[in-house]
Image: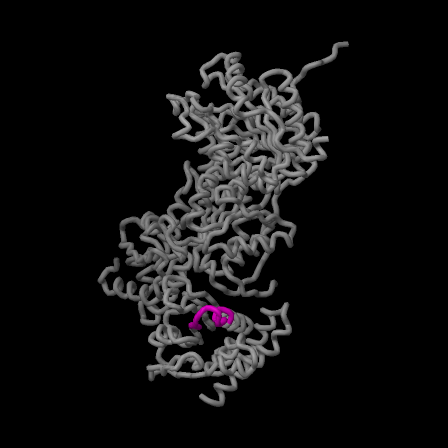
């Protein structure tokens, strides 16, 4: 099984960290993983994104060009990446910031008001964790517990951050389970 | 066994250098390798090492020259324009036969170029770069784990042959994160009785030098260097072959491009096309005979580079004129997708040629 | 019983130098060697040779030497010193090497307070390549690349390195001396010794500029050259100590 993901939004939404946590979680599950930030002329146009691959097979190109999972955190991201999703793939839309509908009918579409959920939790900074929970629930590409383990490792020096981030992660997953 | 850690390529090189016993780093910031310089500035003080940000790449390589001449395991890193500035120093280091490791995380050129990944420095790295008859050992990893392993190996080879070793990466390899494990150096620190470390009872001064005013003496020095290069050619060829046994078309690619090529190759294999891949890991010495043998039964080769065609010259020299060597390259920081390369494969397999 | 009153310092090798008759490099080499001997540091001294007339000085000094690229001796010396902080490391450089192509390296070595010593030989001309204009060539001085005399309107004024380097915090000792007569030679040796002591005490960067003659490329006899230097160079490049730490000045 190979999950090729693009996580996209604007700078400051925690896109890169979201991708790194996913990658770390995959490594904890002893899968082959890679992460690479958007790094090329395609950076122009207001989207920052990263490619993440979690796979049982050896990974070739780390740059994802035909994703089966796309996360769109803002509108330019939706426009840019909706067309390239592999048929049967999953599109996760941050409906707090995107008021347009996706057009594709051959993919699974999940909408989650990530900013609103983060605000309810009282911390706008955890929006990316809400979305990460949503990806896990929507695609089962990885275990939620692995993401938590990854978080604990990556923020070993700041254990106080775990509680709110774990809450956000679980809320994101629950939202998908209930509403989609 | 060491625990796997998730690291950026640039930082992994830095940690691997420390694992290899490197305690002196001299550098100057340039995108896309600055994370390595920053990593060294954080790590070196913690291992009683020296990190020094030089006033220029020129100064940095000459600090490396001094430190290597004084007997240290030493490294510098930069990206294309900065590596151009270091070339004079690299020639001196090669001439004086000093061991050191130089990292080039290539970006688009010529001139100031771009900050995106490219492979346009192949000629510079493998054919000299600076003045005079010399060679760097040039190694081209294609994953974060290999960046680690090759960094450690580079220090060992540099000491073994008293020769500069260049790690030729690119911006993409430097920026990407993958799991890596760290294993220590094979040879560890070696004694350097030739170093200018102060006589300290030795009785006779050591002189680090590349100047031979007598033509006879300089020719003898060159003959000595060429003998050393011949030995390196004999012993230090490194490469990887994937599914070349039955391949009708052999892809040849190194570094990040080999990762994309591999994806394209798997796609072609899934469609029943007999495509294999040959990946030179040592770019100098180039695995000439190994490539010729690997492509023995193939009817064509396809060289893939992030350049307008540089390694292809070595590919042609390796296989001769008996079979077509096709080329597909992107430049300026553009990266081909696996689909783009797959399409080239299809064109060649259908007899339409490629570029 | 005879007493030996004058002998070759052990920090000099027993070979004849390639320097032209009258050249001051030989004197300056000897002063450095005497200082190294007096400080008893020959065994832990590492010298860095430049590109220029003194490129071969590694053959004349009897301790470990590294021959650096043109202008880069301070960077090379930095690399050496950072590997062997206990060693005595110095660069020996001419005016083309230090004040033209190697300006960045000397300025930043001084700015960093690099614990090295530099002996800077200023003879106002490129010697090795046959008498071209140097950054220190005086106004109206004729060289092979200023055949009508140095014109400051086109090439600016000669650069005063000691004065410039003395402005940097990392530079702890800066002096300009000459070896044109025995009195000045004694002063020059004292300055060189102080510059090495600054390093031994870990105080920072130290440089001694030595005004020197180049009879061959100036087209003069050695005696004429000394006179020319006294009349033309000393007024523009005044001798003296520009900077000295308080504890050393006492």
Horizontally, residue B186 falls left or right of residue C198, namely: left
The residue that appears at 27% across and 54% down in the rendered structure is: B323
Residue placed most toward the observer, B115 or C135:
C135
Q: Which span is picked out in magenta?
A: A6-17
Percent across and percent down for residue C233 are: 52, 21
Residue placed most toward the observer, A39 or B125:
A39
Percent across and percent down for residue C23 are: 53, 18
The residue that appears at 41% across and 56% down in the rendered structure is: B115
Indicate whether C63 appears above or below A35.
above
Q: Residue furthest top?
A: C1
Residue C210 seen from this side: yes
Indicate whether A167 appears above or below B140.
below
The residue that appears at 39% across and 45% down in the rendered structure is: B124
Residue placed most toward the observer, B262 or B50:
B50
Indicate whether C165 appears above or below A84.
above
Horizontally, residue B310 falls left or right of residue B140, namely: left
Can residue A13 be found in the magenta stretch?
yes
Can residue B39 be found in the magenta stretch?
no
Indicate whether C117 appears above or below C211.
below
Percent across and percent down for residue B268 are: 33, 68
Counting every numbered tag in the picture gives 0
Residue B194 seen from this side: no
Percent across and percent down for residue C153 are: 39, 29
């Amino acid at each position: 099984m190979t999950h090729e993901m693009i996580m996209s939004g604007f700078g400051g939404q925690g896109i890169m960290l979201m991708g790194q946590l996913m990658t770390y979680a995959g490594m904890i599950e002893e899968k082959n993983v890679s992460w690479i930030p958007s790094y090329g002329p395609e950076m122009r146009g207001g989207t920052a994104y990263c490619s993440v691959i979690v796979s049982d097979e050896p990974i070739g190109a780390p740059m994802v060009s035909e994703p089966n999972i796309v996360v769109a955190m803002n509108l330019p991201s939706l426009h840019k990446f909706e067309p390239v999703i592999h048929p049967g793939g999953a599109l996760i839309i941050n409906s707090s910031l995107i008021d347009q509908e996706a057009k594709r009918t051959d993919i699974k579409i999940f909408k989650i008001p990530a900013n609103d959920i983060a605000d309810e939790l009282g911390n706008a900074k955890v929006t990316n964790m809400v979305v990460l929970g949503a990806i896990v629930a929507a695609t089962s590409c990885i275990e939620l517990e692995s993401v938590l383990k990854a978080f604990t490792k990556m923020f070993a020096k700041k254990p106080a951050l775990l509680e709110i981030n774990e809450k956000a992660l679980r809320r994101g997953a629950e939202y998908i389970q209930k509403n989609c | 066994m060491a625990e796997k850690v998730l690291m950026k390529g640039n930082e992994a090189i830095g940690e691997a250098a420390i694992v290899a016993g490197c305690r002196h780093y001299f550098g100057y910031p340039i995108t896309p390798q600055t994370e390595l310089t920053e990593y060294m500035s954080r790590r070196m003080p913690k291992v009683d090492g020296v990190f020094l940000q030089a006033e220029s790449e020129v100064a940095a390589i000459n600090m490396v020259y001094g430190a290597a001449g004084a007997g240290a395991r030493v490294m510098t890193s930069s990206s294309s324009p900065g590596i151009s500035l270091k070339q004079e120093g690299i020639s001196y280091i090669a001439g004086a036969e000093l061991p050191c490791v130089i990292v080039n995380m290539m970006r688009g050129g010529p001139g100031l170029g771009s900050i995106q990944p490219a492979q346009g420095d192949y000629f510079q790295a493998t054919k000299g770069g600076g003045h005079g008859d010399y060679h760097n050992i040039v190694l081209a990893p294609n994953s974060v784990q290999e960046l680690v392993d090759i960094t450690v190996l580079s220090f060992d080879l540099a000491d073994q042959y008293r020769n500069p070793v260049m790690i030729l990466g690119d911006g993409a390899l430097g920026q990407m994160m993958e799991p890596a494990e760290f294993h220590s150096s094979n040879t560890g620190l070696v004694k350097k009785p030739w170093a200018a470390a102060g006589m300290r009872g030795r009785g006779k001064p050591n002189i680090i030098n590349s100047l031979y005013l007598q033509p006879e003496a300089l020719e003898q020095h060159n003959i000595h260097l060429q003998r050393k290069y011949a030995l390196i050619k004999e012993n230090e060829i490194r490469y990887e072959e994937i599914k070349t046994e039955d391949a009708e078309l052999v892809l040849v690619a190194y570094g990040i491009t080999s990762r994309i090529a591999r994806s394209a190759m798997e796609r072609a294999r899934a469609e029943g096309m007999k495509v294999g891949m040959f990946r030179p890991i040592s770019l100098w010495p180039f695995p000439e005979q190994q490539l010729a043998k690997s492509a023995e039964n193939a009817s064509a080769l396809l060289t893939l580079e992030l350049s307008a065609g540089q390694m292809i010259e070595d590919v042609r020299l390796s296989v001769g004129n008996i079979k077509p060597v096709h080329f597909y390259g992107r430049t300026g920081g553009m990266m081909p997708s696996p689909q783009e390369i797959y399409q080239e494969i299809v064109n060649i397999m259908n007899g339409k040629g490629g570029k | 019983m005879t007493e030996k009153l004058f002998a070759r310092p052990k920090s000099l090798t027993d070979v004849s130098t390639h320097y032209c008759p009258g050249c001051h490099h030989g004197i300056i080499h000897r002063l450095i060697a005497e200082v190294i001997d007096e400080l008893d540091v020959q065994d832990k001294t590492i010298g860095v040779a430049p590109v220029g007339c003194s490129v071969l000085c590694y053959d004349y000094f009897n301790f470990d030497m590294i021959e650096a690229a043109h202008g880069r001796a301070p960077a090379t010396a930095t690399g050496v010193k950072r590997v062997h902080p206990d060693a005595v490391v110095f660069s020996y450089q001419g005016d083309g090497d230090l004040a033209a192509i190697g300006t960045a390296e000397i300025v930043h070595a001084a700015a960093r307070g690099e614990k090295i010593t530099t002996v800077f030989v200023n003879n106002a001309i490129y010697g090795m390549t046959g008498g071209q204009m140097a950054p220190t060539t005086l106004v109206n001085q004729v060289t092979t690349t200023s055949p009508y005399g140095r014109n400051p309107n086109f090439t600016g004024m000669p650069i005063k390195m000691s004065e410039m380097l003395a402005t940097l915090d990392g530079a702890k000792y800066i002096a300009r001396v000459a070896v044109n007569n025995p009195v000045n030679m004694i002063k020059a040796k004292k300055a060189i010794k102080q510059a090495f002591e600054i390093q031994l005490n870990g105080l920072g960067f130290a440089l001694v500029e030595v005004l020197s003659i180049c009879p061959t490329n100036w087209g003069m006899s050695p005696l004429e050259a000394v006179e020319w230097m006294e009349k033309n160079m000393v007024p523009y490049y005044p001798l003296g100590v520009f900077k000295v730490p308080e504890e050393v000045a006492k």
